[in-house]
Amino acid sequence: MKRFIKYIIIVTYLLGMVAYAQSARIFILSADEWAQPRTGEVMASFNSVRNAVDYWQKTYNSSLLIRYPGEDMGELWASELKDWLIALGVPNDYIILRSGLESLDQVQIVVGTKDDLNRL
């Protein structure tokens, strides 16, 4: 009986980890992509942006976290990306900006619940 209880506990824990791993997803927008002239059509053509918005729409109670390099250019990049996400239909209240990304040549769009995003 003890062995069965241990088994149930382990399976429950692993299922919880799988659910967490599937809930938060990271989408990468590279500096090369961002260097292109930007229009609504171009923004919607970026796989990372399109996939992040699609995943956000399909995931209950989720938000988008924009992780960017902590320099002035990174902040400008993140702010403009936020404006584009709003233009694509994501409400302002569902977008979080966070500096401190180590890579200078990308921005990450992380989609998940606020609890998931706070763990990052």
Image: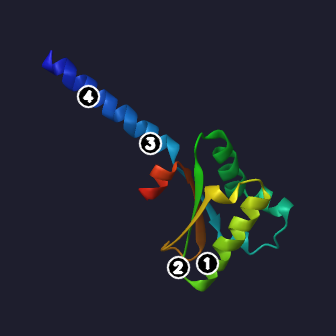
Q: What kind of residue is marked 1?
A: Glu
CB-based contact (under 8 Å), mark 2 and mark 1: yes
CB-based contact (under 8 Å), mark 3 and mark 1: no
**Where on the picture, by quarter, is residue 88?**
bottom right
Report which residue position mark 1 lands on.
Answer: 75
* Residue 88 badge: none
Q: Secondary structure at mark 4?
A: helix
Report which residue position mark 3 lands on.
Answer: 20
Report which residue position mark 4 lands on.
Answer: 9
Give the spatial CA distance, label 2 vs label 3. Answer: 27 Å
CB-based contact (under 8 Å), mark 2 and mark 3: no
Q: Count residues near mark 1 (Cα–Cα under 10 Å), then give few for <14, some for 14-19, many for 20+.
A: some
Residue 83 shown left or right of residue 63 in the figure: right
Q: What kind of residue is marked 4?
A: Ile
Give the spatial CA distance, label 4 vs label 2. Answer: 41 Å
Relative image position of residue 63 (x, y in whole percent): 59, 52
Q: What kind of residue is marked 3?
A: Tyr
Give the spatial CA distance, label 3 vs label 1. Answer: 29 Å
Relative image position of residue 84 (x, y in whole percent): 75, 64
Residue 98 shown left or right of residue 13 in the figure: right
Residue 13 in sight: yes
